[in-house]
């Protein structure tokens, strides 16, 4: 699971109103090099919740993202490189995503987050 | 040519509870191939498969759009965690990547991905079955479609509508029993135009792959797709690639 996906996932339990961002508890992660595509980064940037990304990046020991970001920063190659790395090159293999409202944990196993709900949560 | 690799997708991983590619999967990939040039022109940023099963379809799509390089990213979901795992293995075996998530349709993703997906592909559980079989654990979830095979299909449309970007396209497999004409009419009321990209009758069923797009937005559906289809006989490749199934 890339941090891109973390940024797109919210707690889906019925009745939860404050289910984003899920707290990332990473036990194992790997880094895989991906070719940088500036067009994609510029396209996706407005959709990214920056604080959630920066927080998730810290959970995998990547602390090179600024606390805040705005579109003007996309002109900086250095910024793009860090954004790219955090968003696409770090894969969480094992761990959990924890709902900020209920504390319910969603396991990440072999890189796949499991968002399936129990019957009483739907 | 890169496309020919689609024909080489191998069943590298299998599981007794995961649906193996069959006529419906092949029809969907053939439809995507038939529309491939338009998909390339479409330049999607995010593509998503709902119900990815073995991973055959999302892998094929990723190969087909390979020339767009690293500007395209893929999501794939399945309600069956075994299927999600098999999809990951299929992708990895082909040097591809999609973000795979175990979830019901796009639960947990709908809110944040709303309006962001440029291509949604679905081979839904469309087989008419008793209602209580719908969404069962394991492989039954891949086919059990409830009354007229429409129970899950009718849940998917509002989700797809939410996920699709303004220019987004949806490709879905349906069976005659699902009443595709009525499906298209229903989608028309939601503002979608539609077109049958592939129509295929097998011994057991008559399949349609329908493409939907927001009315008023250019769709560029391919005409005369036969040349692609005849070049890439997927079935034989897949079947001969070494499983006992």
Image (spheres, rainbow, N blue to C red):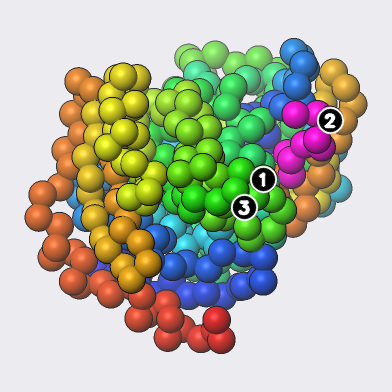
**Which residue is labeled 3 in the image?**
B141
Q: Residues within 10 Å of mark 2 (few under 14, many from 20)?
A: few
**Which residue is labeled 2 in the image?**
A120
Which chain's residue wears label 3?
Answer: B
Q: Quadrant of residue B89?
A: bottom right
Inspect the magenta stretch and tell me whether residue B121 lies in it: no
Magenta highlight range:
A114-122
Q: CA distance from mark 1 to mark 3?
A: 11 Å
User: In this orientation, which residue lies closer to the viewer: B136 or B95?
Assistant: B136
Q: Position of residue B126 (x, y in %)?
A: 47, 49
Examine the residues drawn in magenta and state their main secondary structure. loop
Of labels 1 and 3, the one closer to you: 1
**Is residue B96 placed above or below B104 in the rendered structure?**
below
Q: Position of residue B202 (x, y in %)?
A: 31, 68
Q: Is residue B108 left or right of residue A109?
A: left
**Is residue B131 placed above or below A65 in the rendered structure?**
below
User: In this orientation, which residue lies closer to the viewer: A25 or A31?
Assistant: A25
Q: Earlier in the sequence, mark 1 or mark 3?
A: 1
**Is residue B29 placed above or below B50 in the rendered structure?**
below
Secondary structure at badge 3 equals helix
Q: Are marks 2 and 3 in contact (CB under 8 Å)?
A: no
Secondary structure at badge 1 equals helix
Of labels 1 and 2, the one closer to you: 1
Query: Which residue occupies 10% across, 49% down?
Result: B223
Q: Quadrant of the C terminus of chain B?
A: bottom right
Query: Which residue occupies 28% across, 28% down?
Result: B185
Q: Is residue B230 left or right of residue B73?
A: left
**Which residue is labeled 1 in the image?**
B132
Q: CA distance from mark 2 to mark 3?
A: 20 Å
């Amino acid at each position: 699971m890339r941090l891109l996906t973390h940024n797109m996932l919210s707690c889906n339990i019925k009745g939860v109103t404050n289910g984003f961002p899920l707290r990332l508890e990473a036990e194992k992660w790997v880094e895989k090099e991906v070719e940088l595509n500036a067009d994609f980064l510029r396209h996706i940037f407005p959709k990214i919740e920056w604080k959630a990304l920066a927080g998730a990046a810290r959970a995998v020991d990547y602390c090179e993202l600024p606390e805040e970001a705005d579109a003007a920063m996309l002109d900086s190659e250095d910024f793009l490189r860090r954004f790219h790395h955090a968003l696409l090159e770090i894969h969480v293999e094992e761990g959990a995503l924890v709902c900020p409202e209920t504390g319910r944990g969603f396991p990440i196993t072999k890189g796949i987050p499991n968002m399936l709900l129990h019957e009483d949560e739907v | 040519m890169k496309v020919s690799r689609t024909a080489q997708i191998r069943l590298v991983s299998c599981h007794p509870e995961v649906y193996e590619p069959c006529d419906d999967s092949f029809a969907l990939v053939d439809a995507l191939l038939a529309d491939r040039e338009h998909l390339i022109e479409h330049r999607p940023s995010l593509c998503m498969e709902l119900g990815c099963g073995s991973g055959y379809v999302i892998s094929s799509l990723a190969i087909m759009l390979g020339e767009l390089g690293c500007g395209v990213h893929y999501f794939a979901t399945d309600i069956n965690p075994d299927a999600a795992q098999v999809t990951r293995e299929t992708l990895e075996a082909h040097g591809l990547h999609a973000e795979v998530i175990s979830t019901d349709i796009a639960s947990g993703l709908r809110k944040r991905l709303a309006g962001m997906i440029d291509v949604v592909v679905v081979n839904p559980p469309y087989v008419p079955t008793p209602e209580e079989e719908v969404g069962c654990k394991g492989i039954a979830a891949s086919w059990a479609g409830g009354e007229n095979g429409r129970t899950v299909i009718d849940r998917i449309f509002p989700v797809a509508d939410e996920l699709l970007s303004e220019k987004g396209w949806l490709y879905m497999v349906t069976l005659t029993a699902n009443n595709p004409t009525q499906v298209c009419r229903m989608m028309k009321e939601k503002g979608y135009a539609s077109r049958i990209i592939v129509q295929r009758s097998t011994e057991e069923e008559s399949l349609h792959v329908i493409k939907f797009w927001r009315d008023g937005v250019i769709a560029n559906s391919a005409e005369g797709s036969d040349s692609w289809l005849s070049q890439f006989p997927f079935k034989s490749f897949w079947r001969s690639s070494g499983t006992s199934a």
